[in-house]
Image (cartoon, rainbow, N blue to C red):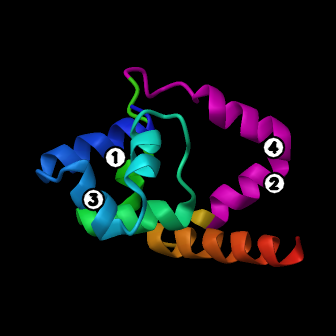
Amino acid sequence: MSTGNNIRKYRELKNFTKEDLAMKARIGIHTLESYETDERTPELDTILKISTVLDIPASELLENHEENSSEIDEELQTLIQEIGVKRSKLLLKKARDFSEQDVLRAMNLLYDLNQQKN
């Protein structure tokens, strides 16, 4: 399942309308709809807002539930190729030492730093 499908699935499990979730997460209804239809991908801070409102770990929204989990998915393979195997291993080894929330906070800090440079 995609992130958008996960958002919709957990929203429906909590019996939230799109309007409920959009209001509580402080995002626009059209923005939420574009996430749920996979027209747009939410930023990490938005994932955190949505996961907080839905009271689930952010990883549940980000997980791509595929039938054959023994294979590395295509997106991960592309990312490893783009940043290199050595950097990928370093990031993944360090990620083991932190909780999911810690990793997402670190990613948000890196995103903010990058935005300040631009």
Percent position of residue 118, x then y:
88, 70
Q: Residue 87: which disc?
A: 2
Q: Which of 73 and 86 is in front in this view?
A: 73
Foreground tag (1 vs 3) = 3
- The residue positioned 78% from the left and 77% from the top of the image is 113
Q: Do the residues labelled 1 and 2 touch (CB within 8 Å)?
A: no
Foreground tag (3 vs 4) = 3
For the magenta stretch, what is the residue range?
Answer: 67-94
- The residue positioned 46% from the left and 72% from the top of the image is 101
Q: How far apart are the two marked residues, 1 and 3, measured between alpha carbons?
A: 10 Å
User: Does the image show residue 84?
Assistant: no
Residue at which label 1 appears = 7
Residue at which label 3 appears = 21
Q: How far apart are the two marked residues, 3 and 4, measured between alpha carbons?
A: 38 Å
Foreground tag (2 vs 3) = 3
Q: How far apart are the two marked residues, 1 and 2, measured between alpha carbons?
A: 30 Å
Q: How far apart are the two marked residues, 2 and 4, measured between alpha carbons?
A: 6 Å
As for residue 82 lying within the magenta part, the answer is: yes
Residue 75 position by quadrant? top right
As for residue 92 lying within the magenta part, the answer is: yes
Kind of residue sitting beneath label 2: Arg
Foreground tag (4 vs 1) = 1
Q: Are marks 2 and 4 in contact (CB under 8 Å)?
A: yes
Which of pointers 2 and 3 lies earlier in the amino acid sequence? 3
Q: How far apart are the two marked residues, 4 and 1, measured between alpha carbons?
A: 31 Å
Q: How far apart are the two marked residues, 2 and 3, measured between alpha carbons?
A: 37 Å
